[in-house]
Image (spheres, rainbow, N blue to C red):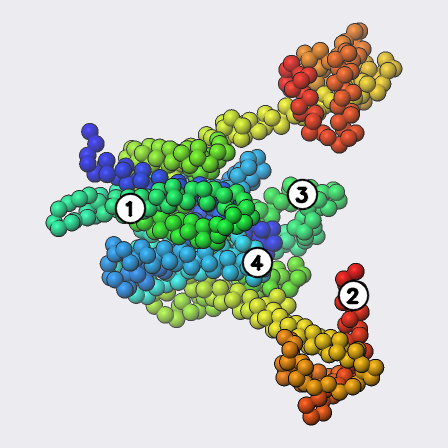
Amino acid sequence: MMSSAQIEIQLIASLVAIACAIPGTFLVLRKMAMISDAISHSILPGIVVGFFITQDLNSPLLILLAALTGVITVVLVEYIQKTGLVKEDTAIGLVFPVLFSIGVLMIAKKANDVHLDIDAVLVGELALAPFDRLLISGADVGPKSLWIIGGILIITIVLLIAFFKELKLSTFDKGLAASLGFSPAIIHYGLMSVSSITTVGAFDAVGAILVVALMIAPAATAYLLTKDLKKMLMLSIVFGVFSAISGYWLAHKLDGSIAGSITTMLGVLFLIVYLFAPSKGIIAVLYREKQQRTEVSLLTFLLHLKNHDEERERHVNHLNEHINWQKVRSKTVLELALKNNMILIENNIVSLTPKGDEFTTQAIDYIITNEDAQIEDMKDDFFLFRG
Amino acid sequence: MLGSFAVLRKQSLLGDAISHAALPGIAISFLITGAKDSNTLLLGALVSGLIGTFWIRGIITKTHLKSDTALGLILSLFFGFGMLLLTFIQKQPNANQAGLDKYLFGQAATLVESDVWMMAIVTGICLFVLLLFWKEFKILLFDKDYAKTLGFNTKTIDILITSFIVLAIVLGLQTVGVVLMSAMLLAPAAAARQWTNSLATMVFLAAIFGAFSGVFGTAISASQNNLSTGPVIVLVAAVFVFISFVFSPSRGLLFKQIRFIKNRRDLQLHKTLSFMYDIAITHDDISHPHEVKILNNFQGYTRGTLKKLVEKNYVTLEGSTWSLTNEGFRSALNLYNQLTKNDE
């Protein structure tokens, strides 16, 4: 039986996963994934300053200030980048450690005695989340982080639905978006603010690193499976929630950090998709590369046959010596050609069939006119079996 | 030092990713050996750092995911996995486990003599290899295809550089910690880049900047209570970067601004001069005096530009009239010709 604390933890983790997956998808698509890492580190000074002002780790001012630091990070990165002195990624790599250092030093100088741990910021402890209850006029309405992250999630979803068209357009075609009158800058900073707020809201429940993982990993996994934005959003939400819940149970079993095991589940999920995704996965890619290599060899072989009428050049053994293929390779190519009815072999002499001849003639035409891409379509017409 | 290569190869954030990716390696090697021998831990970190790096490569080359996504992904996934292992270790009945998390934030004070020797040796080896393969590194860095056509084994060199970057990072982890390592890798190199265009000078400068920020940072943090070494070093390095950004003679912001203002002033001067030329050419005598008031209609004209022109002996002033000198006429004609030439 699950206790209510367990349910609450899973609920919080799932909500965080969804709240992260939405901005994460856009960050991945906009090639700004590392910004989330930068934000998650550089919000530290914002939190510390907020803490000095309010002396309360849970005040909303803290979240606002931290989110502000996040946006400042983005602005700084962009400013440094605009000077043209260094590349964007170097700018990111310079800005966030500096801000983070300032945060660490501020903690070390002033706040040593309070509960404001760097470990807690980076790692977070989801298991403690249910113990921090939100009391409204004395009545227990649930864990505080549930409300915070729930609120952020609702805002995110509302913004997503309201600006979906603008977001989509400015992500894929900045120029068009600008010419249609949407300001890419506003959308950009809007997205950055949402990411900052989500990071801040989620960090005290799950820690900075998990926020980054939850933003990037589900979106990257989904991106390997689909190119449709809506599907990608849905998939990354599903992946996020799945790893949140399964990660919780993994942590339960190992008695380890929940954030860590959620990340591990995300990693496992990504690894599986990375290897086995139907068209983008590593195995599919390697298979396709091999197939293409064989088919290119086949074409070379057919061209060779067409150019040479003398029997000496068309002897099976000659292939090994002349074209310099290994035995296995020649065998694969020969078999493929035979299967596709492109060649005939009589007494170890290879000759083109009419079909093979037609194929080769067309291929030469395309090669001469520099329309190599057409050969792919042609293969569909001629090939019964692919390489 | 090695950071120079990272910066120039646009792999700046690799340092960040590797330093995070090293964590599970540390945890696993601790789980296997059960001892806190820093050499085995470093070996573990090195291995998992390398795995992380090459996985990042794999993702970038084999899928359509971009490098930033790959970096962020590997960084967070490895780190999360490392955290899981660390918490798992903490639950184990092993007295040795305390202090593993020191690797996270780094504490130069925990270094013992053998660690320092180790670092010195590795630095020496890095330096040696760097000098040995200097030419190869350089070509690979700036023109990969050319290196290939020259017959260098680009893959091996590539792996070599990457391995050394990983090694340097893993070693540095103990001093400044995971988060700040990327800054240590980047900041000196980014600062050095502003001062020079030559690779050799840049590497040399980066090494000096790095060493200085290390020394100053440690000194400052030792002089006061409660200042951890890592962040101070990073901040000192950041100051170096800032100074370089602003004051570097050829690329710095300050001089850029000065150049910008100077160019604008030159442009205004030229505009005024050509305006005067247009007026003067309508008269037979080019030095025919004109009222200064005419110039008021012209945007680029200010008292300052007129004064400048007089100083340059292009224009003479008499009371409230001005006239072009021969010299001024010639240079304006020159300007005019240049303009029409450019138009063609």
| Residue tagged 2 | B340
Q: Give the alpha-carbon distance from disc 2 to disc 4, as whole Å.
A: 37 Å
Residue B330 is situated, as x and y percent measured from the top left of the image, at 81, 78
The quadrant the C terminus of chain A occupies is: top right
For the residues beneath circles 1 and 2, the answer to whether they share a chain is no
Name the chain under label 4. Answer: A
The mark found on residue A86 in the picture is: 4
Answer yes or no: are tags 2 and 4 on the same subunit: no
Callout 4 crowding tier (Cα within 10 Å): few <14, some 14–19, many ≥20: some
- Mark 2 vs 4: CB contact within 8 A: no
- Name the residue type under label 4: Val
Spatial CA distance of label 1 from label 2 is 64 Å
Task: Give me the chain letter of mark 3.
Answer: B
In front: label 2 or label 3? 2
Which residue matches tag 3?
A: B154
Q: On the image, numbered disc 1 is attached to which residue? A: A151
Q: Badge 2: few (under 14), some or many (20 or more) residues near its Cα, within 10 Å?
A: few
